[in-house]
């Protein structure tokens, strides 16, 4: 019998256990301690939708969020997470200025209508154009009479205009292109795309009736819209990005700077979220920056979650040391906290211990959604540095001691370790592998969406089966002299 279907006869029992039955005891289960029984398949894996709200207001096409660890998420990770439909959280183990710079890189990567392009006056030099390209990666700069957005458009400087000019003190008015193709204010992206295609230009200035620059459109950005149709974007059509903070008083300044940089989600990164420090920070952010979504935590029990929800968080992170790299249990906590939080409309993230597609699907099946820095070689294996944010290395590098209230401690006690993990390769290959695997997992359960999964969890039609230690051993690779697992190709 398919466990996702109720029996026609009362005397035929359902297979396995419901979530309430599995997690009703006092035992703490990991994702390895149980399996999810299959359901009835009536659709293709490609028809499974993975859309989910990761905060009260932020909806993603993929339920993947990268960790705010200093060896995991900076701008490049966050950009690719967003392009593929997830969300990246920029770590705060750095200065406020450095973190805000990483956020701006994400927000400027793909803009649709670029509403704050870098502009220069006609008296600017090519050296200033070079500086913009070096710092921000933009090779084309509109020239206005004021040198700012809103000024009268006078010309445009692209690489082809000055590539062979050796004297970089040359003023831009001597080399800029003055015969420009422009779009009128109010045009749509589709109309702008047609103008760009017909004119064969790389950039398209948008001007009002007075000839003043109001926006800029890039062919590259339109191409990205085509190549990444499910990218995570906000109302301004810019990529979504999150950033972590701690709970010290100076982090209120950090939040204000992040909001100015365009951050969409703020994650309060603490090993134990049920504290007066987090209460003060949550209430401050919600009162001062009401449009920013606040993620609180970490928590592992309902009593912690109850306080954070009462303080006003928009999402919760579940897990205290449940990851492979932290030393301070996991499925049980996710189930109970998510069950409580869902009643209050608060999404939850399963933080830590999510190492493969199976565990991702099991975390989702418990009611949650969630999901690695520079690599090096050792003994011929490509590795990545990887450390818990409570490790001595992380606390020594930057500000992560704040999240463990250890900044002024004479002796720092490690709540994590440093190490290395095998690099799984480019996100361009790994994220599609994860999303495809997750779709197959939901197909096996006979459920076509995350919402259907959580509905089945709530009404008991999603069935679980506990595994003994012997079952876990039999279910893994055994009795082989040598085995090599290849996740994807």
Image (cartoon, rainbow, N blue to C red):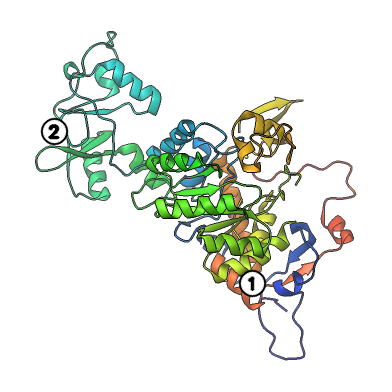
Contact (CB < 8 A) between labels 1 and 2? no
N-terminal label among 1 and 2:
2
Query: For the point 77% across and 63% down, which residue is it?
Result: 34
Query: For the point 84% across and 58% down, which residue is it?
Result: 472
- Picture quarter with the C terminus: top right
Calculate the distance from the C-alpha at mark 1 to the C-alpha at mark 2: 59 Å
Query: For the point 25% across and 16% down, which residue is it?
Result: 125
Q: Is residue 275 above or below residue 209?
A: below
Confirm whether residue 108 shows in the render. Answer: yes
Say left or right for 205 vs 35. left
Q: Nearer the viewer, residue 465 or 328?
A: 328
In which quadrant of the rendered view does residue 463 lie? bottom right
Name the residue furthest top.
167
Q: What SS does tag 1 mark?
A: helix
The crowding category of the residue bearing disc 2, from other C-alpha atoms within 10 Å (few below 14, some 14 to 19, many at least 20), is some
Say left or right for 55 vs 439. left
| Residue at which label 2 appears | 152
Say left or right for 34 vs 284. right
Q: Is residue 153 above or below residue 469?
A: above
**Residue 98 tag number:** none
Q: Nearer the viewer, residue 417 or 463?
A: 417
Q: Nearer the viewer, residue 158 or 135?
A: 135
Q: What SS does tag 2 mark?
A: loop
Q: Nearer the viewer, residue 440 or 324?
A: 324
Task: Find residue 108 and report its horizontal and vertical position in percent.
Answer: 38, 38
Say left or right for 298 vs 412. left
In which quadrant of the rendered view does residue 126 lie? top left
| Residue at which label 1 appears | 457
Confirm whether residue 50 shows in the render. Answer: no
Task: Find residue 110 and report its horizontal and vertical position in percent.
Answer: 38, 41
């Amino acid at each position: 019998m398919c466990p996702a279907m109720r029996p026609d006869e009362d005397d035929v029992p359902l297979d396995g256990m419901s979530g309430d039955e599995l997690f009703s005891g006092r035992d703490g289960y990991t994702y390895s301690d149980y399996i999810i029984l299959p359901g009835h398949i009536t659709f293709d894996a490609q028809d499974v939708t993975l859309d989910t709200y990761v905060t009260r207001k932020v909806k993603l096409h993929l339920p993947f969020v990268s960790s705010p660890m200093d060896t995991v998420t900076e701008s490049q990770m966050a950009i690719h997470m967003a392009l593929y439909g997830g969300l990246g959280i920029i770590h705060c183990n750095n200065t406020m200025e450095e973190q805000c710079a990483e956020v701006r890189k994400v927000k400027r990567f793909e803009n649709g209508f670029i509403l704050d392009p870098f502009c220069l006056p006609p008296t600017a030099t090519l050296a200033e154009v070079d500086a913009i390209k070096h710092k921000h990666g933009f090779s084309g700069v509109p020239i206005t009479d004021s040198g700012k957005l809103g000024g009268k458009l006078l010309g445009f400087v692209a690489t082809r205009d000055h590539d062979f000019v050796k004297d970089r003190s040359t003023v831009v008015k001597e080399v800029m292109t003055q015969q420009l193709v422009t779009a009128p204010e109010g045009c749509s992206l589709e109309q702008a795309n047609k103008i760009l295609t017909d004119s064969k230009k790389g950039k398209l200035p948008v001007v009002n009736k007075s000839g003043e620059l109001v926006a800029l459109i890039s062919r590259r950005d339109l191409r990205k819209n085509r190549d990444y149709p499910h990218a995570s974007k906000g109302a301004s059509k810019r990529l979504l990005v999150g950033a972590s903070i701690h709970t010290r008083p100076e982090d209120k300044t950090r939040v204000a700077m992040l909001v100015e940089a365009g951050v969409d989600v703020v994650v309060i990164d603490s090993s134990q979220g049920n504290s007066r420090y987090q209460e003060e920070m949550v209430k401050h952010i919600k009162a001062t920056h009401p449009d920013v979504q606040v993620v609180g935590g970490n928590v592992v029990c309902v009593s912690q979650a109850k306080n954070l929800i009462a303080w006003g968080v928009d999402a919760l992170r579940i897990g205290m040391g449940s990851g492979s790299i932290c030393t301070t249990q996991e499925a049980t906590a996710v189930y109970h906290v998510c069950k409580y939080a869902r009643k209050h409309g608060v999404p939850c993230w399963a933080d830590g211990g999510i190492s493969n597609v199976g565990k991702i699907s099991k975390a989702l099946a418990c009611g949650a959604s969630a999901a690695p820095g520079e690599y090096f070689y050792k003994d011929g294996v490509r590795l990545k540095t990887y450390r818990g944010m409570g490790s001595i290395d992380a606390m020594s590098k930057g500000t992560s001691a704040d999240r463990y209230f250890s900044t002024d401690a004479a002796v720092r006690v490690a709540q994590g370790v440093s190490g290395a993990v095998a690099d799984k390769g480019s996100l361009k290959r790994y994220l599609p592998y994860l999303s495809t695997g997750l779709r197959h997992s939901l197909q096996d359960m006979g459920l076509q969406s995350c919402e259907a999964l959580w509905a089945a969890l709530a009404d008991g039609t999603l069935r679980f089966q506990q595994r003994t230690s012997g079952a876990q051993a039999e279910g893994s690779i055994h009795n082989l002299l040598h085995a090599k697992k290849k996740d994807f190709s």
